[in-house]
Image (cartoon, helix red, strand yellow):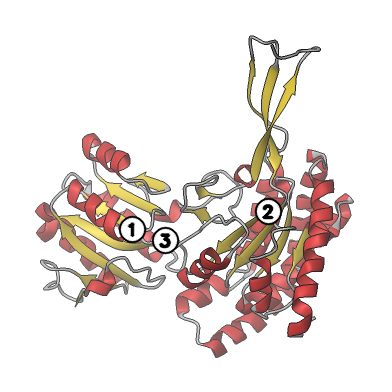
Amino acid sequence: MKDMENIPQMMAELGARARAAAADLAFAPAEVKQHALEAAADAVWARRDEIIAANAKDMEFGRDKGLSPAMMDRLMLDEARIQGMCDGLRNVAAQADPVGAVMAEWDQPTGLNIRRVRTPLGVIGVIYESRPNVTADAGALCLKAGNAVILRGGSESFHSAGLIHACLQDGLRAAGLPEDAIQRVPTRDRAAVAEMLTMTDTIDVIVPRGGKGLVGLVQREARVPVFAHLEGIVHIFVDAAADADKARKVVLNAKTRRTGICGAAECLLIHRQIADGLGAQLIADLVAAGVRVHAGAGLDHLPGVQAATDDDWGREYLDMDIAVKLVDDVQGAIAHIRDFGSNHTDCVITEDDTVAATFFQRLDSAILMRNASTQFADGGEFGMGAEIGIATGKMHARGPVGAEQLTSFKYLVEGDGTTRA
């Protein structure tokens, strides 16, 4: 299977089997899908020691590959994270089934009754990098929305993802659903990714979840439609009217809670009026926490910082680094974010409702926040149970992509011998 010559055949077979499974899943009862996900959660917990042992192999592979500490943190699984994975599976299981939900209904003067109802997309291909928990999140969300899925995890998480995938298939078997509903590409060979991107006959949409290199590759080369999950170049603007205690808590949490996730703050914009007061305090907090602060003009004299360069603006560090810049007002912050942001998540810290309204109105990021840590940019925290990614494009899905966002819709039109004049 790992031979280059066999990869196109292998991927074609995966696609054909996924397409057949999707036809069955499209009308699978809600309670059956729920049972499959609950059984999968039970299997993950029962096999947690095996998963942790497999993850140890992946961690060794990551160390040998020279992954950064932040990337190693993304890769690592312990019992607490496995518990979180189980909770995510059960949360998705407990949600209302989106398939068949009536989005709108109306009657026409002609006598027609028209309903717009949610329907599965079909077959979803998910390409992701080091985080093994994406295996569970993506598999669960696709199944909940009645879709078959082909998972292609990163080489770093190969062993962990394999065990988690096996648990998902345990759940499918327990519920009597086709095992081909959740398939995994069983090779590290990158040729499999190239095949997935052109499988227009069997894959309806590709979801890339990873760094700029992966997402850029998918966007350039895919012939299948893509839900883009690009960089999380996340900005926080601290206004002159910010509450100091709120600002200190939010900024520190947004940067340091987990630096390797896409909701981690990467650039701090500070109103010039508070540079010497709250601004200096925020930078001191970050330095004390071990963050490397890349400070722009007017801030580069502060203790423990290093001078920012042009390359620091618009950079996704995914590490204990942050760029910091002074701006004149909310308009200056908006201008900077428009130039250097990625339309992912941006935050304003202010007690001034007018400033907050301007920030919300004039920026078009998928997620805009006020006085809250950007680490909340997560489908689970939005009540979606889990997410398959944060979509930064504008077509179909935007922001956290949960089960509902993995559906399309169709129109059901009923008449009574009705004819058109």
Most distant residue in the front direction: 421
Residue 43 appears in the figure: no
Q: Tell me where residue 248 appears, x and y as whole percent.
A: 27, 56
Q: Tell me where residue 64 appears, x and y as whole percent.
A: 56, 90
Picture residue at 78% right of the left edge, 67% below the top: 12
- 384 and 188: which is toward the camera: 188
Picture residue at 10% right of the left edge, 66% below the top: 298
Read off the residue under disc 3. Answer: 232
Most distant residue in the bottom direction: 64
Left/right of residue 300 with respect to residue 2 in the rendered view: left
| Secondary structure category for the residue under label 3 | loop
Read off the residue under disc 2. Answer: 204
Read off the residue under disc 1. Answer: 341
Q: Looking at numbered disc 3 in the image, what kind of residue is underneath it? A: Gly
Label 3 near label 2: C-beta < 8 Å?
no
Most distant residue in the right direction: 176
Along the polypeptide, which appears first: circle 2 or circle 1?
2
- Position of residue 331 relative to residue 76, above or below, is above
> Where, quadrant-wise, is the C terminus in this rendering?
top right
| Secondary structure category for the residue under label 2 | loop
Q: Looking at numbered disc 1 in the image, what kind of residue is underneath it? A: Gly
> Where, quadrant-wise, is the N terminus in this rendering?
bottom right
Q: Tell me where residue 342 appears, x and y as whole percent.
A: 38, 58
Q: Looking at numbered disc 2 in the image, what kind of residue is underneath it? A: Asp
